[in-house]
Image (spheres, rainbow, N blue to C red):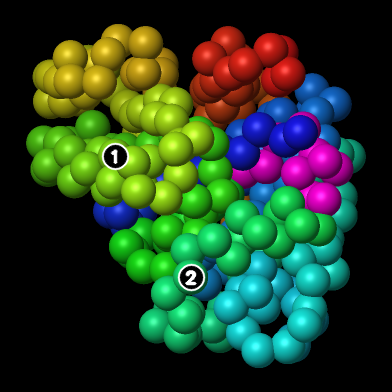
Amino acid sequence: MAEIIVITNRKGGTGKTTTSVNLAAEFASQSLRVLLIDMDTQGHCAVGLNIAPPKDAPTVHSLFQSGNSRLTEAVYHTAWPNLDLIPANTLFEHGSCDGNPTRLTRALHDEGVTEQYDLIIIDSPPSLDDLLMNALCAARKVLVPFMPHHLSGEGIRNLARVLFRVASDLNPELKLLAFLPIMLDRRIGQHKSVTEGVARQFGQGRLLSGIRTDIKLAEAFAHRQPVRAYMPGCRGAEDYALTAREISARLEPRMN
Ligand SMILES: Nc1ncnc2c1ncn2[C@@H]1O[C@H](COP(=O)(O)OP(=O)(O)OP(=O)(O)O)[C@@H](O)[C@H]1O
Ligand SMILES: [Mg+2]
């Protein structure tokens, strides 16, 4: 059965999508069968993996619309072996869900999707709404990319409260996997103090080494490729490879 990781931070622009696309590609390169699900109606995962879903084709958001389309009808094979995508509907209106937080969970299990993959990564929107709740209910692990700035601390603590509530009320399987500093420069005092604060609060084992600033990550995205394909060996590619190793070491044996 697939391990399911949601990548989340309610703050916008913290590297959620960059991390989702590049980690998915990294794990797929290790011959794991990987499915990336884009819950964010910005639809950027499809851009990053060079998928252009036809208008009106099923997406993950079809689960929240009338009609009987199945989640498996929304799966696209990407150009990279073992890497599939379920894209977002960029026209879906966030407010139009029905308050049921388990639609995604049910579809993944009822349609046997969890049996077809080793790893499912869910990219989530930067809003606290039904789409995020569906992602949190479907996942077993939470990965939080964050910018190591002073203002991030409060956002992370708020997020931790949401995760705790979801874990106690809705999804007892949900566990905080790790925090991933994005655009990290350890020579900057503020970056060092913020990451050390996260380690103190949540445990050193929950703090990953982090991703340095690398314009190649943005360029790879613009070229619609994971960075490991666009510029192998660049800082961003190295850092996401290390992050994948650090995550594997923290997951249960089925992923190792
Ligand atoms: N390590 C990095 N170095 C340089 N640029 C980066 C890095 N990580 C992300 N970026 C850039 O920062 C911007 C925001 O990243 P991204 O879209 O992944 O964030 P996000 O959390 O998914 O945003 P949103 O909340 O809007 O969904 C993008 O332009 C991306 O290319
Ligand atoms: Mg995003």
Mark 2, ligand 1, within 8 Å: the answer is: no
Q: Which amino acid type corresponds to the residue marked 2 in the rendered image?
A: Asn
Reading the image, the residue beneath label 2 is 100
Residue 111 picture location, percent across and down: 81, 58
Residue 63 figure quarter: bottom right
Residue 172 picture location, percent across and down: 44, 38
Q: Residue at x 53, y 14 (%)?
A: 250
Label 1: state its secondary structure.
helix
Q: Is residue 157 above or below residue 194?
A: below
Label 2: state its secondary structure.
loop
Label for residue 8?
Answer: none
Q: Is residue 193 left or right of residue 234?
A: left
In the rendered image, is residue 150 in sight?
A: yes
Q: Is residue 15 above or below residue 194?
A: below
Mark 1, ligand 1, within 8 Å: the answer is: no
What span is colored magenta in the figure?
A: 112-121
Q: Residue at x 76, y 33 (%)?
A: 1
Residue 130 figure quarter: bottom left
Q: Residue at x 71, y 20 (%)?
A: 255
Reading the image, the residue beneath label 1 is 164
| Alpha carbons under labels 2 and 1: distance apart | 19 Å
The front one of 218 and 88 is 88
